[in-house]
Image (spheres, rainbow, N blue to C red):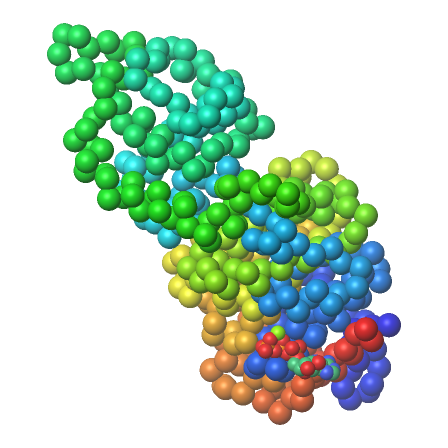
Amino acid sequence: MTAMTDLRTGRPVHRPLTDQHLLVVGQTGSGKTTTALALLDQLQQTDQTAIVFDPTGEYAQLPHAVTYRLGGNAYLEAGRLDPGELQAVLGLDLPERLERQMSRAMNALRIQRNLLQQPGPLKKVGRPLARYQSLLNQLSAWSRDYAIAELPQQLLEEAVIPFADDQADYSLCGQTYDREQIRHDWGLLTDLRERLASPAFRDLFDTQGHPGMAKTELGFVLKLFLQHRSSHRTLVIDLSLLRRYERQQGALLSELFKQVLNNRLARRDQPQPAVKIVLDEAHRYLPAADQELSHNGIFQLLREGRKVNLQLLLTTQSPLDLPARLRSQFGRALVHRLSSGDELAALPVVPKLSTASTLATGEALLLAVGEADQLVRVQKPRW
Ligand SMILES: Nc1ncnc2c1ncn2[C@@H]1O[C@H](COP(=O)(O)OP(=O)(O)OP(=O)(O)O)[C@@H](O)[C@H]1O
Ligand SMILES: [Mg+2]
């Protein structure tokens, strides 16, 4: 059964919809989520893989899907974040000097956990530089993990310097703490410590461990689906707990989309069957301004996903919710009821038919570059 029929002729629509990025827009209650569900139903019938980012928990009703709830039974590995990403997730904006120091601190903690297998921060006072350098060289991609809660303490260790007099020994990492600098940075270090200890961060990154509770690292699950090693074909990532973390959710989604894209880019030499990515209510996670887009994972996936066979289905209430540069990545749109002329004019493909404001729930205008507009009715999945 096809997901939609032509509104005039009643015939099934056989035009492919999910073989490129698809933008689904329409007023609240006009049928966007139902359309995404209908398309997912169709993908399941043809054994195609899809990963759904679900802001509200509405996709839990999809049969034959595996669902993980971020902050519930799934967490993110903090070790995957670089200093810039970590700051975005924590809502911090550190000066560049401290950001570089943070990158050094992360490596020191990686050594401490993976090579020295010691708890706590890695002490740098009196440590021979040459030996430290050789430990750094031994760090590899698998030793990415580190004790993130120790980061503020490790930053103090990064502020060690040689003595200022003839006792100075430049073959050591340092001999004493640069107390001036630490005093100067103290406020920022306190911010970092408190944000790392916040319930939001602890839940999403599972920094405290989880005795007696089975939690899964989301990056691992994503990899299974992206590399087609899962027997299931639909993965639903329930983001409904993120609503409590208004400020962090955009940065987190950006991070997840980067993981998806990078996973694919890293294996470009191998055949990569198509994977459809669904993001409902995308405006919640996207920056409003064009300037902030280039570092955004969602935008990066839109721009680079094609070459690694990733297609994005994105829904939002109004095209005006999305930065113009992002909208222009779509060659196809499915427009549910939409009343304002400004909104219609902002669509990536401007409709020739003027019926968008009178569409009933579940009806839509199918627009594609270089093709005639088509009025369609979406069939609500039987389940
Ligand atoms: N194609 C359809 N056939 C029958 N009923 C539909 C169809 N599409 C939507 N509906 C019904 O309309 C209501 C709203 O649909 P839906 O949740 O899909 O809208 P939405 O655009 O995602 O809304 P929101 O912006 O609030 O998320 C639901 O009760 C749904 O069952
Ligand atoms: Mg919806």
Q: Is residue 61 left or right of residue 249?
A: right
Say which of 123 and 365 sits in front: 123
Q: Quadrant of ligand 2?
A: bottom right
Pinpoint residue 87: horizontal percent, then vertical percent. 39, 46
Quadrant the C terminus occupies: bottom right
Residue at the spot 83% in from the left edge and 85% down from the top edge:
10
On screen, 332 above or below 30?
above
Residue extending furthest left? Answer: 165
Residue extending furthest bottom? Answer: 358
Say which of 125 and 25 sits in front: 125
Q: Is residue 371 left or right of residue 90?
A: right
Residue at the spot 82% in from the left edge and 75% down from the top edge:
382
- Is residue 45 in sight in this rendering? yes
Residue at the spot 77% in from the left edge and 46% down from the top edge:
230
Pinpoint residue 130: horizontal percent, then vertical percent. 38, 10
Pinpoint residue 150: horizontal percent, then vertical percent. 41, 34
Quadrant in the picture for residue 51: bottom right
Quadrant the N terminus occupies: bottom right
On screen, 75 above or below 366?
above
Pinpoint residue 157: horizontal percent, then vertical percent. 32, 26
- Is residue 368 in sight in this rendering? no
